[in-house]
Image (cartoon, rainbow, N blue to C red):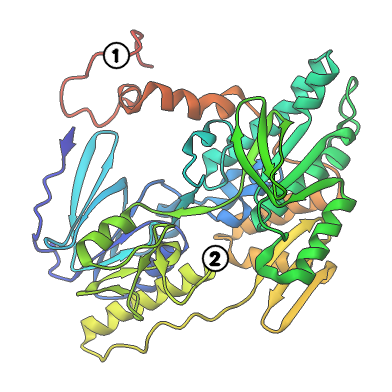
C-alpha cells in the first residue's frame, strides 16, 4: 500500500480555505456546484467516477436506459469549475481533530486536509442484519447492481427457454421483489411490462406472459409514505398488471433457488424463484458512525447522525453532514433533502468565509414525492394534492428530466422512453455473464486480485500474480 505525500494541516497552494466534499451524489454534486465561484479550493472525493441519478436505476436494470444516461462522469460535470479537483477513492477515515480525510483506491492511500468539510456519503442497501442475503438478492444502489439485475432478469427468460422441466421453468420465470416502497413498486411494474409487452412474442418454447411477479413487504401497505388511498390505487394497478402483491410477509431466509417468508399469521412458506431483488431498507454510510464517535453526536439504528439545525456536528461548525446520512426532524431519504442540504452547507461556508452572520437553521422545502407504476400511470404526493394516473406520470417524466445532468443525456433519455413507453422495445437488452457473476467473483477473490489486474498505481515492484496468469 502506498500513501500520497499530503501533510495534515499543510497550507493550500493558493492560500485559500480548503473545502473537502465526500461523495458525488446529489448532496456532494450540488454543494460543489454552489461553490463554483467561491474563493476556496474544493476537493471532491468520490467512490466512483460518476454522479449517479439513483431514482432511474430500475430503468437500467429493465433495459429502458443505458447506464451512461443516468451516470455522467463527475469530472465532465465539474470540468468548468477551476477551483475544483475531483479525486477517485473510498473515504475510510475522517479525523476531526487533525482535520483530515483519508481515502483509498487500489491500495493507494491519500490524505486530504480541510478547513471546511461536507460529508455527503449517502446510504447503502440494508438487509436488516442478514447481509448474506446480498449474495442471491442484489440491491438497487449502484450501476453494478442495476447491470447485474439486468443480466439476471433477461437471463432468466433465456434459461427458461432452454429448460424442459416445468418446475424449472416456473422457478426461472418467478421474480420476487422485496420492498413495496417506490423502488420496489417501479421495479415490479417494469418486470411485468417486460413479460407482458416487450418479450411477449420473442420466445418459442415459453410464454413470457405467464411469468410470476411477486412484490413482498412486511408492512401492511404499498407505498406507505404516500398514504392509504394512493397506496391502494398503486396496489390495484399492480394487480391489474399481473403483479402479486403480498403484504405482511417477512423474509426469513433465501438462497439461490428461492425465498422463505413468514406471514403475519405466523405461518411460513417458500417461494421458488431464481431472481430475487432487494428493494427494502437503507443503511447510512459507516462514516456516520465515525463522525458520531468523535463528536459525541447520536446515531440511530440506520446509521444516521443527529446533526445540529445548521447541519453541522456538535463542537465542529466546520463539518457539515447532508443527505441520507442525517437524522434531523424525520427528514425523508430523498434526493431533494440532499440537494437542498448541499446547497445550504455551501452557502454556510461562503458566509463564514465572508465574515457574514450564520444563516437561519436549515429548513427543508418538501417538493413532494412521485412513483411510477407502469407506462402512463404514476402516483404523486405534492403538498396538499395527492393524485394518480396519466397526469402524475407526465409530471414524473418532466421532473426527472429536469434533474438528469447534461443536454445529451436528456435527449437520449426521451428517445429511449419513447421506444419503451410508446412502443414495445427496450433499447438496452444486453446481458452478459460478467454482469451476473462479476460481483460474486470479485468478492470471492478479494481486493488483492483487483489490484493485481489493474496495471496501475504500482509504485513498487509488481506483486506476484495471484491467478498465476499474465495480466493483459
Q: Is residue 347 above or below residue 235?
A: below
Residue visible at 51% across and 26% down in the picture:
438
Where in the figure is residue 441, as x and y percent of width and height? 47, 23
Find numbered disc 1 in the image and state the secondary structure of the residue it sits on.
Answer: loop
| Residue on which disc 1 sits | 465
Q: In front: mark 1 or mark 2?
A: 2
Disc 2 target residue:
334
- How far apart are labels 1 and 2 at the CA level? 43 Å
Q: Is residue 44 left or right of residue 73?
A: left
Q: Position of residue 233 (x, y in %)?
A: 83, 65
The reply to whether residue 430 is in sight is: no
- Residue at the spot 85% in from the left edge and 19% down from the top edge: 166
The answer to whether one can see residue 29 in this image is yes
Q: Quadrant of residue 84?
A: bottom left
Q: Quadrant of the C terminus?
A: top left
The front one of 215 and 430 is 215
Find residue 296 and report its horizontal and vertical position in percent. 23, 67
Picture disc at residue 211: none
Amino acid at each position: 500500500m502506498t500513501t500520497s505525500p499530503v501533510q495534515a494541516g499543510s497550507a493550500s497552494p493558493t492560500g485559500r480555505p480548503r473545502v473537502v466534499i465526500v461523495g458525488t451524489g446529489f448532496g456532494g454534486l450540488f454543494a460543489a456546484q454552489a461553490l463554483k465561484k467561491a474563493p476556496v479550493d474544493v476537493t471532491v472525493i468520490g467512490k466512483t467516477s460518476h454522479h449517479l441519478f439513483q431514482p432511474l436505476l430500475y430503468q437500467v436494470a429493465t433495459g429502458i436506459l443505458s447506464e451512461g444516461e443516468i451516470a455522467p462522469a463527475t469530472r465532465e460535470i465539474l470540468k468548468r469549475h477551476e477551483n475544483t479537483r475531483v479525486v477517485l477513492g473510498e473515504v475510510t477515515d475522517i479525523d476531526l481533530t487533525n482535520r483530515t480525510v483519508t481515502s483509498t483506491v487500489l491500495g493507494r492511500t491519500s490524505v486530504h486536509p480541510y478547513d471546511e468539510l461536507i460529508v455527503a456519503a449517502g446510504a447503502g442497501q440494508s438487509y436488516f442484519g442478514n447481509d448474506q442475503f446480498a449474495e442471491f438478492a442484489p440491491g438497487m444502489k449502484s450501476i453494478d447492481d442495476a447491470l447485474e439485475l439486468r443480466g439476471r432478469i433477461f437471463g432468466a427468460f433465456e434459461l427458461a427457454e432452454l429448460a424442459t422441466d416445468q418446475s424449472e421453468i416456473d422457478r426461472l420465470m418467478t421474480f420476487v421483489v422485496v420492498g413495496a416502497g417506490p423502488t420496489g413498486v417501479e421495479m415490479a411494474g417494469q418486470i411485468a411490462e417486460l413479460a407482458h409487452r416487450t418479450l411477449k412474442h420473442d420466445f418459442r418454447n415459453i410464454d413470457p406472459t405467464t411469468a410470476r411477479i411477486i412484490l413482498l413487504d412486511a408492512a401492511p401497505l404499498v407505498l406507505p409514505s404516500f398514504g392509504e388511498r394512493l397506496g391502494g390505487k398503486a396496489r390495484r394497478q399492480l394487480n391489474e398488471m399481473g403483479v402479486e402483491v403480498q403484504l405482511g410477509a417477512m423474509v426469513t431466509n433465501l438462497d439461490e433457488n428461492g425465498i422463505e417468508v413468514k406471514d403475519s399469521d405466523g405461518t411460513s412458506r417458500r417461494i421458488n424463484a431464481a431472481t430475487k431483488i432487494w428493494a427494502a431498507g437503507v443503511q447510512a454510510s459507516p462514516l456516520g458512525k465515525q463522525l458520531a464517535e468523535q463528536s459525541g453526536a447520536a446515531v440511530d439504528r440506520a446509521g444516521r447522525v443527529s446533526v445540529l439545525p445548521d447541519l453541522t456536528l456538535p463542537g465542529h461548525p466546520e463539518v457539515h453532514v447532508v443527505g441520507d446520512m442525517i437524522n434531523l426532524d424525520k427528514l425523508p431519504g430523498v434526493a431533494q433533502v440532499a440537494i437542498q442540504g448541499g446547497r445550504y452547507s455551501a452557502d454556510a461556508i461562503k458566509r463564514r468565509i465572508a465574515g457574514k452572520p450564520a444563516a437561519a437553521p436549515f429548513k427543508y422545502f418538501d417538493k413532494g414525492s412521485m412513483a411510477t407504476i407502469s407506462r402512463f400511470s404514476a402516483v404523486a404526493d405534492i403538498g396538499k394534492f395527492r393524485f394518480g394516473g396519466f397526469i402524475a406520470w407526465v409530471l414524473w417524466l418532466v421532473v426527472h428530466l429536469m434533474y438528469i445532468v447534461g443536454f445529451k443525456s436528456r435527449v437520449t433519455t426521451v428517445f429511449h422512453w419513447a421506444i419503451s413507453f410508446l412502443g414495445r422495445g427496450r433499447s438496452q437488452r444486453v446481458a452478459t455473464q460478467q454482469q451476473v457473476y462479476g460481483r460474486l467473483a470479485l468478492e470471492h477473490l478479494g481486493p488483492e486480485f483487483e489490484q493485481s489486474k489493474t496495471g496501475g498505481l504500482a509504485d513498487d515492484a509488481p506483486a506476484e500474480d495471484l491467478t498465476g496468469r499474465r495480466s493483459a
